[in-house]
Image: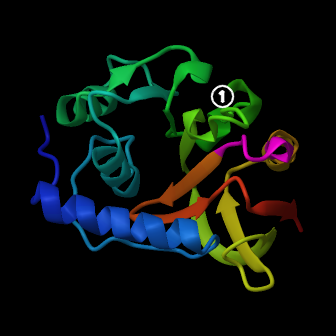
Amino acid sequence: MLKGFDSEVFDSQAVFRNLLLAMANPGTIAAPDIHLSCPDRLAPGAGALLLTLLDFETVLWSDLDPETPEIKWVHFHTGTRLTPAPDRAGFALFTDSEKLMDPGRFNPGTAASPDLSTTLVIQTRGLDQDQKLRLTGPGIEKEAFIHYAGIPPEFWENRAIMNQAYPAGIDMILVHASRITALPRTTKVAVC
């Protein structure tokens, strides 16, 4: 079994600080300065996020089989519980953007309890500030642009429909290698 963080406290704090920066400033690319060896199909950025955010009380859904080395590694280091039902997960991990499903299959929370929603962690095939998606909303002065390689336009259309029920909705953290960005449910995404 591959080890987790070198320093569980300091590394998780660094990842969390970078995640807060990315959530507060949608479209910003953050790169926590940590070194983490993950099983093959798990990007270091996604692995670091999961080690930081998951524990024995959280429920994870993934596009990977529960018996894969990646999921066993996550479970070993976090104690998280797994679910086969997307709408019952607190977090969802997509290691392959081609396997993305309609975000409407996940729990958007409710107006009274938006915190019960699923947060998606999506590994992309690339991440840059190209003008493929236009972002607007809180934390963005006027507009920002970003490109997540491998994510089809219809996924963004489905997310936009789902997030019209604010404060219910889906928050997303997108990863490529060790770099992360975040799209809170308040961020509007338009395909350019």
> Residue drawn at (55%, 42%), measured in percent from left and top?
119
Which percent across, then down, holds residue 168? 72, 40
Quadrant in the picture for the C terminus: bottom right
What residue did someone put label 1 on?
106
Q: Please, what is the dominant secondary structure of the magenta stretch? A: loop
> What span is in magenta?
163-170
Quadrant in the picture for the N terminus: top left
> Residue drawn at (84%, 48%), measured in percent from left and top?
160
Which percent across, then down, holds residue 108? 69, 34
Tally the numbered discs: 1
> Residue drawn at (23%, 68%), measured in percent from left and top?
34
Q: Is residue 161 left or right of residue 40?
A: right
- Asked if the stretch drawn in magenta spans residue 116, the answer is no
Vertically, is 147 above or below 103? Answer: below
Amino acid type indicated by mark 1: Phe
Element at label 1: loop
For residue 186, which quarter of the picture? bottom right
For residue 140, which quarter of the picture? bottom right
Vertically, is 182 above or below 167? Answer: below
- Asked if the stretch drawn in magenta spans residue 165, the answer is yes
Residue placed most toward the observer, 64 or 109 = 109
Vertically, is 142 above or below 173? Answer: below
Res. 124 in view: no
Which percent across, then down, holds residue 80? 31, 28
Residue placed most toward the observer, 144 or 36 = 144
Q: Is residue 119 left or right of residue 170?
A: left
Vertically, is 89 above or below 165? Answer: above
For residue 113, which quarter of the picture? top right
Q: Is residue 155 left or right of residue 126?
A: right
Residue placed most toward the observer, 112 or 189 = 112
Circle 1: is it few (<14), some (14-19), or many (20+) Cα within 10 Å? Answer: many
